[in-house]
Image (cartoon, rainbow, N blue to C red):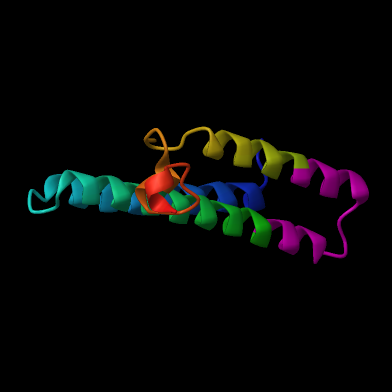
C-alpha cells in the first residue's frame, strides 16, 4: 500500500505528463509548424518535462526531511519509494531523436555548429 504522500507525488507527475502530452498533441496537430521546428519543440518539451519531474521529487524529498516525527525506517522507506517512482517515470520518456541537443544548437558534435 502506498502512503498518501507518495500518491500525491505520483499524481503530480501524472498531471504534469498529461499537460506535456497535450502540448505535444497541439504541436503535432498544427500543420503550420515546420517538421524541424516541431522536433525542436519536442526536445524543449522533453527537457522541461524532465526538469518538472525532478522538481516534484526534490520537493517531496524536502518535505520528508522537514517532517521531524518520522522514524529513520519510515524516512528510508519513503526515500526508496521516491527513488522507485523517479526511475519509473524517467524510463517512460515520450520520444527521442538521435542527437536532441544538436537540434537546438547546444553542445553539438556537429562541426558546423561551432
The quadrant in which residue 68 appears is: bottom right
Residue 30, percent from left and from top: 11, 51
Q: Residue at x 30, y 53 (%)?
A: 41
Q: Main secondary structure of the magenta part?
A: helix
Residue 29 as seen in the image, left or right of residue 89: left
Q: Residue at x 39, y 37 (%)?
A: 94
Quadrant location of the N terminus in the rendered image: top right
Q: Which residues are magenta?
A: 60-79
Q: Residue at x 46, y 54 (%)?
A: 106
Q: Is residue 92 above or below residue 31?
A: above
Q: Is residue 62 above or below residue 7?
A: below
Residue 37 as seen in the image, left or right of residue 91: left
Residue 5 as seen in the image, left or right of residue 23: right
Does 61 appear in magenta? Answer: yes
Residue 81, percent from left and from top: 70, 40
Q: Is residue 25 visible?
A: no
Query: Who is closer to the viewer here, 75 or 104?
Result: 104
The quadrant in which residue 65 appears is: bottom right
Amino acid at each position: 500500500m502506498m502512503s498518501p504522500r507518495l500518491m500525491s507525488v505520483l499524481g503530480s507527475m501524472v498531471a504534469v505528463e498529461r499537460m506535456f502530452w497535450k502540448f505535444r498533441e497541439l504541436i503535432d496537430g498544427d500543420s503550420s509548424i515546420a517538421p524541424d521546428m516541431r522536433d525542436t519543440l519536442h526536445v524543449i518539451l522533453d527537457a522541461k518535462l524532465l526538469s518538472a519531474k525532478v522538481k516534484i521529487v526534490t520537493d517531496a524529498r524536502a518535505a520528508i526531511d522537514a517532517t521531524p516525527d518520522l522514524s529513520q525506517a519510515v524516512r528510508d522507506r519513503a526515500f526508496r519509494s521516491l527513488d522507485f517512482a523517479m526511475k519509473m517515470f524517467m524510463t517512460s520518456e515520450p520520444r527521442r531523436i538521435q542527437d536532441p541537443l544538436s537540434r537546438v544548437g547546444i553542445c553539438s558534435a556537429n562541426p558546423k555548429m561551432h
